[in-house]
Image: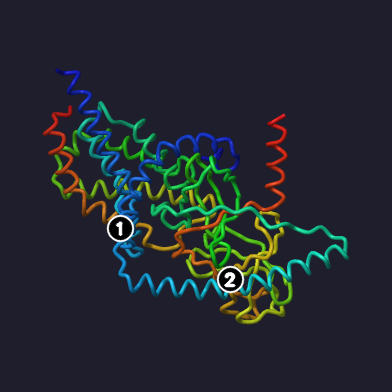
Amino acid sequence: MNGNNYHLGKIVIAGSFLVALLLTAMPLPEWAVNWRPAWVAMVLAYWCMALPHRVGIGIGWLLGILVDVMQGALLGQNAIGFAIIAYLVINSHQRMRMFPFLQQALLIGLMVSFSLLLSLWVRGIMGVPPHSWTYWMPVFTSMLLWPWLFIILRDLRRRYHVS
Amino acid sequence: MTVDHRYGHLESLRSALSVVVYPVQYVVNLPIRFARWTSESLDTRESLIEDNQHLRAEQLLLSQKLQKYEILEMENRRLRKLLESSFKLSERVLIAELLDVDLQPFRHTVLINKGEREGVYDGQPIVDADGIMGQIVHVGPFSSTVLLITDPSHALPVQINRNGLRGIAVGTGQSHVLQLEYLPNNADIQKGDLIVSSGLGSRFPAGYPVGVVTEIKLDPAESFAKVMVEPSAKLEQSREVLLIWPHDHAQRSGEKDGLANL
């Protein structure tokens, strides 16, 4: 029974990441493209906070590589940011679980902006920096959507007893 | 990251991983394909007839132009023979379809549904019906990534069709503007000049339209003129694009194939 549950949990986690990847690749109208929240980073942060023994830096890095390949970016450009998000969340997961939504959202915003900063740095070294302040919009949309994402993923986790 | 940027060693890893990612991109593309399919099959009879008439008229015009073109090509071949210079045969092409998938923000890249299986190679030129669109930067087995000419990291050797003046068209990151670099202030260039690819650098075939000069800013304080070009390819509207195998490359890969067969 226990083993069965473990595999079900694997499927649930992988499924949530798959949906996040789909949302990342989904075409949006031109005005909304720059507002796209950092879906994968948010889902990764949730699982790292809820189940730090199952989802960690390695998975974050692998997801980052997948996103890089999907977007045709330099290999590692997103991976480094995701790995660092995973590290930060795992480091403080016990505190973050206690925080109210607002405070969690602020922390998530901080982490997303940190990963964006790293990506910006890599692009700057490559010589193709984005020259528009809308580059930072994902931080705000991620913060806004965090409570809803949190509730959805929490219900999902409780329903399928993922632990 | 440095290894990926500077050297090509990770390209095989990337193309292997792109197989893993392709289903995701395919699924994302599905609803859009479905919507397109429904809108196409629910088109009214009148609009289809209208389209048909329009296309017929266009075909008539084009075939008339083609007649003239064939005569010109023959004449060109004859004259070149007289000059004893080599004549370039027309290139091999293949139609590819764009996938409606959003890639990296703030880069001008698109995904097409042709890959290594169809013989796509790194650096291959892509055109649409109106002009040069870009070149391939990553090849996967089933899909490949195209860097558009408007990307800020893209540069393209061009010449002005009117007088053969050579220059380099660099992407600006805005989707309707290219910039011609390193043209002196006294260069013979006018608004409305057609810019075509020059074939230097042997990546893009010569003679494909790139864009039209829209604005020339002459600033005596600057050593070069600021020339803006509007791309003639419909970079944001095209759904189908053409992959081109320039003649010499096709021949080279043919030779390779021949060796492999031995």
Placement of B154 over or under B119, stated as above or below:
below
Q: Nearer the viewer, residue B134 or B10?
A: B134
Placement of B98 over or under B141, stated as above or below:
below
Of badges 1 and 2, the one in the foreground is: 1
Chain identifier of the residue bearing label 2 in the image: B
Q: Position of residue B92 (x, y in %)?
A: 63, 53
Q: Residue at x 12, y 33 (%)?
A: A158
Q: Secondary structure at mark 1?
A: helix
Placement of B73 over or under A56, stated as above or below:
below
Question: Disc number at residue B211?
Answer: 2
Q: Position of residue A25 (x, y in %)?
A: 35, 49
Q: Nearer the viewer, residue A39 or B149?
A: B149
Q: Position of residue A129 (x, y in %)?
A: 48, 56
Q: Position of residue B170 (x, y in %)?
A: 59, 64
Question: Disc number at residue A73?
Answer: none
Taking the image as shown, residue B151 lies to the left or right of residue A15, namely: right
Taking the image as shown, residue B123 lies to the left or right of residue A114, namely: right
Quadrant of residue B162 in the image? bottom right
Placement of A102 over or under A33, stated as above or below:
above
Chain identifier of the residue bearing label 1 in the image: B
Quadrant of residue B161 in the image? bottom right
Point out the tag, 1 or 2, that comes first from the N-terminus.
1
**Tag 1 residue:** B35
Q: Amino acid at mark 2?
A: Gly
Do the numbered discs 1 and 2 sit on residues whose CB atoms are within 8 Å?
Answer: no
Q: Amino acid at mark 1?
A: Ala
- How crowded is the residue under tag 1: few (<14 C-alpha within 10 Å), some, or many (20+)? few
Q: Residue at x 46, y 48 (%)?
A: B113
Q: Secondary structure at mark 2?
A: strand
- How crowded is the residue under tag 2: few (<14 C-alpha within 10 Å), some, or many (20+)? many
